[in-house]
Amino acid sequence: MSSLPSELRDQLRTVDIHERDTARLAAIYHRSVARLLTGALAASGHPAGGDLGRRVRRLPPALVRRAYSLPDTPISDTEVPGLLSDLEAAAQPPAPAGVLTHDDGSWAQEGAVRATRALAADDHGAIEVVADPSTVVLESLLKARAALSASWDAAWREHNTLVDCMVFAGGPLRSATNQSTFGAVYISIDEAEDPLRLFEVLLHETGHHSLALRERFTTFLHNAETLSSHPLRKDPRPLRGTLHAAFVLARICRGLARYLAVHPASGPLDREEVVVRLRANRAMLVSVMEGMGEAARWTEDGEALHASLLAVLAEQETAAHEVAEHEVAA
């Protein structure tokens, strides 16, 4: 991290969003992954990929997965043209996040299983990618996206910077991401007809991507593997997961609060349900922060990130208190 410009180091240490800095950090990460591919290409007698790798802006999840699988599966000659073409495409400005409509090489199916396994869900084999989501699901996603872009422009831009595609799947998952397919968000098809649920998913899983990106450059906890529990998970999990829970809850609370501020009367989401979800997420944020504060041993960057999360918590508690006073007065 010492080689990063100071403004990028500052972005690592906060839950706040500075989309230009995030885009720069993401490009650095994706180029580091691309070097795995270009190195393997050069070793197999195809050095032309080196220049492309240095120009990469964002790798698609399938290419991220291929890079991480290199130790087990070396590049074959038949893959080379496709890889060079994919690297060329990855050097272009990233397109807004899309929806998976096909699965070349079954990377998404594998990624969905890996993501579910990481959540300790049972029956991983029951996961099945849905590459042709219904019109109702796509309309629900459209409403969720409209709500986010209108309510919190920075979060909307960050989403489209970090997330390449959304993958709907049936089976024992709600939503998930996985480092091996960075850029993909896996979403339960069973909940996808609810625009508010998808609004939360956009904030939640983009938040995981955002913190995972930060973790590529620094360490926040001296005891990241110490087991801890929090309201989003019944089973004890490493503190790193608890930090992720706090980070995404802070993002969800801010997103829901911003939605209510921008849509005081009506909008694409059910306002009464937004209020209910905001209260529930605020309560979970309080619980997660209390539990983490007792157990966490922070690094210097972790202290700064913790302070940023505490600032969001104070902001949300103040807002909740003001709403309660207004309701009593009414």
Image (spheres, grey):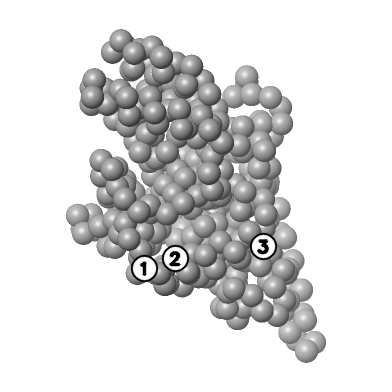
Label located before the other in sequence (3 or 2): 2
Where is residue 193, by image quadrant?
Answer: bottom left
Q: Which residue is mark 2?
A: 138
Say which amino acid is labelled 2. Answer: Leu
Place of residue 148 in the rendered image (x, y in percent of width and height, measured from the top left)? 61, 61
Place of residue 224 in the rendered image (x, y in percent of width and height, measured from the top left)? 46, 39
The one nearer the camera, 295 or 62, is 62
Residue drawn at x 27%, y 62% is 171
How many marks the image carries: the answer is 3
Is residue 115 something one can see in this rendering?
yes
Q: Residues within 10 Å of mark 2 (few under 14, many from 20)?
A: some
When the figure is inspected, residue 221 is found, relative to residue 247, above or below; the finding is: above
Mark 3 vs mark 1, CA separation in Å: 24 Å
Residue drawn at x 44%, y 65% is 138
Q: Quadrant of the C terminus?
A: bottom right
Q: Which mark is residue 134?
A: 1
Q: Secondary structure at mark 3?
A: helix
Say which amino acid is labelled 3. Answer: Ala
Q: Which mark is residue 150?
A: 3
Q: Secondary structure at mark 2?
A: helix
Place of residue 308 in the rendered image (x, y in percent of width and height, measured from the top left)? 68, 47
